[in-house]
Amino acid sequence: MDWGALHTILGGVNKHSTSIGKIWLTVLFIFRIMILVVAAERVWGDEQDDFICNTLQPGCKNVCYDHFFPISHIRLWALQLIFVSTPALLVAMHVAYRRHEKKRQFRKGDQKCEYKDIEEIRRQRFRIEGSLWWTYTSSIFFRLVFEAVFMYAFYFMYDGFQMPRLMKCNAWPCPNTVDCFVSRPTEKTVFTIFMIAVSSICILLNVAELCYLLTKFFLRRSKKAANPKQHPNHENKEETKQNEMNELISDSCQNTVIGFSS
Amino acid sequence: MNWAGLYTVLSGVNRHSTAIGRIWLSVIFIFRIMVLVVAAESVWGDEKSSFTCNTQQPGCNSVCYDHFFPISHIRLWALQLILVTTPALLVAMHVAYQQHQEKKLLVLTGHADPKHMEEVKKHKMRISGSLWWTYVCSVVFRLLFEAVFMYIFYMLYPGYQMVRLVKCEAYPCPNTVDCFISRPTEKTIFTVFMLVTSSICIVLNVAELVYLVVRACARRGQHNSNPSSGKGSFYGHKLSSEYKQNEINQLLTEQDGSLKDMLRRNPGLQEKGDRCSAC
């Protein structure tokens, strides 16, 4: 179970996303996950081994490293990426539920169901409206919240986004104050800024998608308000009621006929 | 065989689970197994090499590490995840058995065409009857394993917190020696994270258990008020009545056949045979 598996899981969600959602997913996988795996992990690979303190006191290096790096950048990014990509699964679950309902309708032989076979239901792409719109919007909202929370956690833990070369440590058992040197600080700063920049782009994409969905929603509502008779849902409701009435009439007619014949 | 292999095996079970069961499986794979593989394993990667003791005594480092970490967190979590996910295989086995029975039924009733066979393989089994009991047992076992491992964790590493310093006096360390653990804060963060997700999984399992019990009671109540609406397996309901009729017909023809044989062998029984022809 690794990033590849996550890609497979989220690939399915891609079908039901908006165009901005698809761009967001691409940016996430190529510019964040892939960079993390092929580049950033190597840069941070020797972070503790090459964290050197100017002392022979055993344990001082461990304690100082732990003091300055409560949680490594790499792990924070991994957690951030996992949390940011999982709200999309809410949408996947909702789509799966809708598909299941449509399959049930189809199997019952419901005449309202316009699909020719089950394969068509499986392949169909659902429009983002109704309850699915709410699920989708909530998922974007959660993504935004997680991105913001992790960016803040980064800023809070590492006092800005820059990696210093030298840290002065006086935690026990270090004698007095000890100079400790971080390995590859410039490269780490470059990658930190890169990941922050891409994270900001993802936040912008999410905000844009949210605005797009809201605009679509209000446009659709105003269209509905302006043309109530031409609305397909409204037509279907009328048809449904007429169908029900017809069924009731035919049933009662049958019963009457049977009653007469007996 | 690795976590991906386990994922393949358990994805099949996913189809026959309840909605809560599917959520539980997603939480297990994404928030526990995936976090373990991509993050936690690298945090604990250098746990022994960076475990430093304030001594030059050979062997003291190893002995102290062994004393304080009888089994590493990572291995405990791996065991926990494997044991917690495998009861779902009970359900998979039961479903496979039921599908096999349905296929046999189809063959017996002459519906053994490829289309029907595919249908049996593809349709989702209802969690009722003996499958319900298997499913409930699997959920109970999951809960048990989660609780047992959480308790083991608590016993081995009191308070779930990783300390920076441990004082060790095991032989051959001279007197008491200070030993420093690598990345204690990061380890504490991940321990708490895994603990929280474990608790979420326990809550999901309890919710699933309650849901199954309530559904069974509701179905029983519905059954008592409407006995003719009982449904078994997908084809069971359609075919069971046909199957019964076929069995009856078979028995009748066999009886007829054996009666005729008997009459042929014992002509004196003809009268009795005449009287019994309606049996």
Image: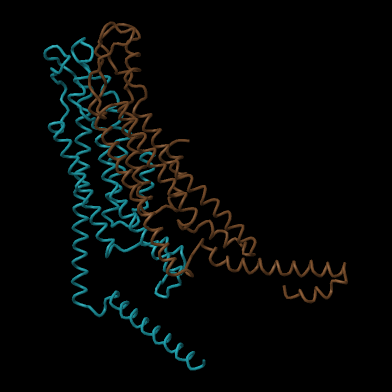
Chain colours: A cyan, B brown
Left or right: A194 as drawn, with respect to A242 = left
A50 and A239: which one is in front? A239
Q: Count the marks.
A: 0
Give percent across and percent down for residue A132: 29, 61
A164 and B179: which one is in front? B179
Left or right: B110 as drawn, with respect to A203 = right
Name the quarter where the N terminus of chain A is drawn: top left
Q: Residue at position x 48%, y 45% from top? A: B90
Give percent across and percent down for residue B17: 42, 52
Query: Eyeballing the image, is A122 above or below B267?
Result: above
Q: Residue B277 appears in which quarter of the rendering?
A: bottom right
Left or right: A33 as drawn, with respect to B145 = left
B130 and A99: which one is in front? B130
Query: Eyeballing the image, is A113 above or below A246?
Result: above
Q: Residue B7 appears in which quarter of the rendering?
A: top left
Query: Eyeballing the image, is A118 above or below A163?
Result: below
Give percent across and percent down for residue A23: 28, 51
* Residue extending furthest toward the bottom: A260
Query: Eyeballing the image, is B220 above or below A59?
Result: below
Give percent across and percent down for residue A26: 30, 47
Q: Residue at position x 42%, y 37% from top? A: B83
